Amino acid sequence: MTPADFESIRVDLDPPVATITLDRPQALNAITPQMLAELAEALEHAGHQPAVVVVVLTGAGRAFSAGVDLKALGDRRLDDGKVGDLLDVPARRVIDLIGSLNAVVIAKVNGHCFTGALELALACDIVIAAEEAVLGDTHAKWGLRPTWGMSQRLPWLVGAARPTPRPPSPGGRRPTGVWSHWPAHGPTSTPRRPRSPPPWRPTAGVL
């Protein structure tokens, strides 16, 4: 498969930067097995370009991604709070590729970034969010466990204490997020800790 064959994402190579765009705007870029497979192929393709030193992951339209497309599960049952290998296996492959890529991977978050999408964003080296971005985790709402590593990665990044709410947006809302400061003049970012492995290794059925 080549970038020209992708249906759920777009890949734009402009060395030293490669931009990968989740491209299902009509579904708020909801994550499907096909999208994850294409995302893995795109990351491998970018990794094979010696001139690419930065990979930007973003979403088309008004969302980074609304999270997993539950319609993609069909009639499958959610056993023990897991979505199953249909999504878990390709998602973990994507996250492993993000961590091993010989390039800085930046999540450029616009609009909604929920649950599975938040798992992908947190796996990146840097998260840069637009002021209108809204991040959230709805695993508990759907009776799911975060099986892609977020249960370990999120407290490792922000600490065990509850994240500090960001200042109200111009509309007066005060959603919580992983940022302790959100300047009104533009986006901010939370750089990942130095690229050393956290004190855990994800294994199937544990996270």
Image: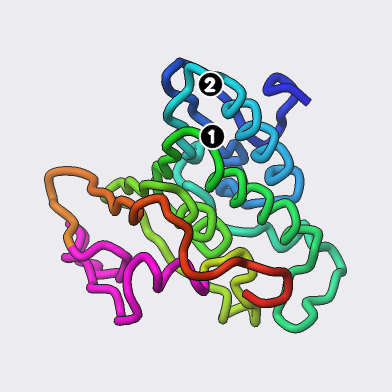
Image quarter in which the C terminus is found: bottom right
Q: For mark 2, does the 10 Å Cα neighbourhood hold few (<14), some (14 to 19), or many (20 or more) residues?
A: some
Instruction: Provide the residue designation for mark 2.
Output: 12
Indicate left or right for 155 with 149 as reference.
left
Q: Which residues are magenta?
A: 151-180
Sequence-wise first label, 1 or 2: 2
Along the line of sight, which residue is nearer the eye, 177 or 14?
A: 14
The disc placed on residue 21 is: 1
Local crowd at mark 1 within 10 Å, few (<14), some, or many (≥20)? many
Relative vertical location of residue 94 with respect to residue 156 in this rendering, above or below: above
State the residue at coordinates (73%, 22%). 2
In the rendered structure, are the residues bearing label 1 and label 2 in contact, judged by CB atoms less than 8 Å apart? yes
- Percent across and percent down for residue 26 are 60, 43
In magenta stretch: residue 60: no
Inspect the image, locate mark 1, and give the three-letter code of the amino acid beneath it.
Answer: Thr
Which element is circle 1 on? strand
Up-down relation of residue 71 to residue 57 (above or below): below
The quarter of the displayed image where residue 134 is located: bottom left
Amino acid on which disc 2 is placed: Asp
Foreground residue among 154 and 181: 154
Q: Nearer the viewer, residue 7 or 11?
A: 11
175 relative to 146 in the view: left or right: left
Residue 190 position within the rendered picture, expressed as x and y whole percent measured from the top left:
29, 53
Measuring 62% from the left and 40% from the top, which residue is drawn there? 24
Q: Looking at the image, what colour scheme do you see?
A: rainbow
- Percent of width and height locating residue 74: 84, 63
Is residue 202 rendered to the left or right of residue 197? right
Residue at 53% from the left image edge and 60% from the top image edge: 119
**Residue at 50% across / 34% down in the picture?**
102
**Residue 150 vertical placement versus 30 (above, below):** below
